Amino acid sequence: MYDVAVIGSGYGGAAVAARLAAHGRVLVIERGGWWRPGEFPETVAALARTRHRRGDPDGLWGVRLGAGTGVGYASAFGGSSAINYGITIRPADHAFAGWPVTAAELAPWFERAERALGATPNPRAVALPDGDVLDALEPGARIDLANTIDWPRCDDCGRCVPGCNAGAKRSLDRSYLATALAAGAALRLATEVREIAIAPDGYRLHLRRRGGGGAEWVPARRVVLAAGTLGTHDLLHRSAIPLGPRFGRDLSLNGDGLAFLYDSGRRLTAHRGAPISTAVRLTMVDGDGARRTLLAMSGRVPQAALRFAGAALAAIAGVAIDPAAPRDHRAGRWARRLRDLIAIGDRGALARTLMYKLDGQDQGRGTVRFTPTGAVIDWPDYADDPILRFAAARLRAWAGAIGGVVVPDVARLPGFRSFSVHPLGGCRLGADLADGVVDPLGRVFAPAGGVYPGLRIADGAIVRGSLGVPPSLTIAALAERIAADLERELLLSRTAAAAH
Ligand SMILES: Cc1cc2nc3c(=O)[nH]c(=O)nc-3n(C[C@H](O)[C@H](O)[C@H](O)COP(=O)(O)OP(=O)(O)OC[C@H]3O[C@@H](n4cnc5c(N)ncnc54)[C@H](O)[C@@H]3O)c2cc1C
Ligand code: SF4
């Protein structure tokens, strides 16, 4: 009998496992494999081969398409840390307005998570021209981001997504999960939890291992669900555990978006490798007077997609994408665009392009729909969210200042749709059953009253609303707080057992 079974090894599961492994019998169950440097896909063909499909333990990355939106995720030891940029940032305090826990209460847990993840700013960022351009466009708004990267080992190859083959990324297998394993946590890789059943002394988990081998039921006194926002929905739905009325509602896509200022009048870096390390943080005030953050990060086109991006943007620039934006007719544009079609280099149009990865505080109007292949998020008019409109307006203003063709949101192009790698919520933290699915310590509310003893959620699904910045640090901080409470519970039950 395990004291705690942790389902999923992303930021939430890894933080909980690291803090509890020294205090009881902890089992971590992860459906994906352990991807090591040298094994990540680098070509379009390899990417296609490593796509995750339901029940496939060998897939690395996956996509779920809902109405109006698509969501990207990872299936791997370390969750999405295996394939992400490792940007580690705290949200502004106003992101926690309306939460049942305040920014001040969360501050010590953020500090704990920051120490464990060990992110540092890019020492080479000063040499990149995008910082100067951003300073000129939005004076005083630029911030240098911190990433979980060993910068001396990073060769700026720009392949952080979908995985670092140079061993420079400090993904969770090198931080929290290494701590958990060193402290004695048991690990089941390539093993999917199919169902959670409530038992008199805790829970039974139905496991399906790589290659089959029949059903296995593993007992645990406590279960921490950390299977990622969609994975946690899948599992709760399959297990038919009765939940409150907010289950699967109020999901945010964290204002995720992608925009370009193509072929501008300034030398830029969309074509060059290097992790994302520069951004501007802007604030809009919505119709209700609430402040909302927009983080516009200067990105790089993934190396495997450079030729495609060069051709696609050249084609898009030939048509009127955004009639409200200033049109740019600078000399030499066709030669620059043609050069990108032959070979990407410093004299092409991509070398004058700002690629914007946007994160912002959207209105959180997504809903989960359960399909035969798993949970998807529906939000048909996500692309019209006020934060994405605000982002498009800033981009037009920048085009007025430095020229370039505005592609305000690739989701609006024919054949494309909004896409997010930051799905949040659906099991949000709340004060009670009417307000949320879990309490501020991740305990799951039971419709019959109280909470399910020993059942907690500690991943992106509990994040109450849009953060406006990449979410991994916040998920880890919330999980740290939940783990501290579980640690107290484990110590108490050990003391009680010793007294008998
Ligand atoms: C391409 C990409 C880039 C990103 N860049 C950043 C960034 O730079 N900074 C940032 O802060 N955020 C970034 N994010 C988002 C961030 O990585 C996620 O928000 C975060 O990883 C979510 O953590 P989590 O604990 O909710 O679960 P996840 O990281 O999603 O992990 C959940 C794990 O549970 C496993 N699982 C699911 N179901 C089961 C089951 N039934 N049984 C067993 N295991 C299961 C999955 O395989 C997965 O490994 C990015 C995400 C992606 C996809
Ligand atoms: S840019 Fe650096 S961290 Fe990213 S994949 Fe390349 S070596 Fe790894």
Image: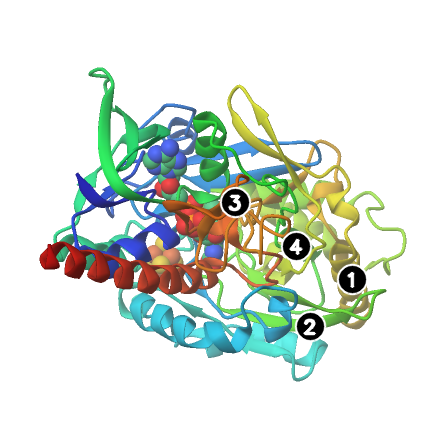
Q: Residue at x 20, y 62 (%)?
A: 491
State the image coordinates of residue 209 (x, y, percent, origin top left). Answer: 24, 25
**Badge 4 amino acid:** Gly
Q: Earlier in the sequence, mark 4 or mark 2?
A: 4
> Is the C-beta separation of discs 1 and 3 under 8 Å?
no
Q: Residue at x 72, y 40 (%)?
A: 315
Q: Secondary structure at mark 4?
A: loop
> Is the C-beta separation of discs 1 and 4 under 8 Å?
no
Q: Looking at mark 1, is its residue's CB closer than 8 Å to ligand 1?
A: no
Give the image's coloring scheme.
rainbow
Q: Residues within 10 Å of mark 3 (few under 14, many from 20)?
A: few
State the image coordinates of residue 109 (x, y, percent, origin top left). Answer: 40, 71
Q: Secondary structure at mark 3?
A: loop
Foreground residue, 384 or 336? 384
Q: Earlier in the sequence, mark 1 or mark 3?
A: 1
Q: Which residue is mark 4?
A: 255
**Badge 2 amino acid:** Leu
Q: Is residue 381 left or right of residue 173?
A: right
Q: Which residue is mark 3?
A: 449
Q: Among all residues in the image, which is located at the extreme bottom?
A: 140
Q: Which residue is mark 2?
A: 282
Cα–Cα span, label 1 and label 2? 10 Å
Cα–Cα span, label 4 and label 2? 13 Å
Q: Residue at x 55, y 69 (%)?
A: 91
**Badge 1 amino acid:** Phe
Please say if 493 is above or below 163: below
Cα–Cα span, label 1 and label 3? 42 Å
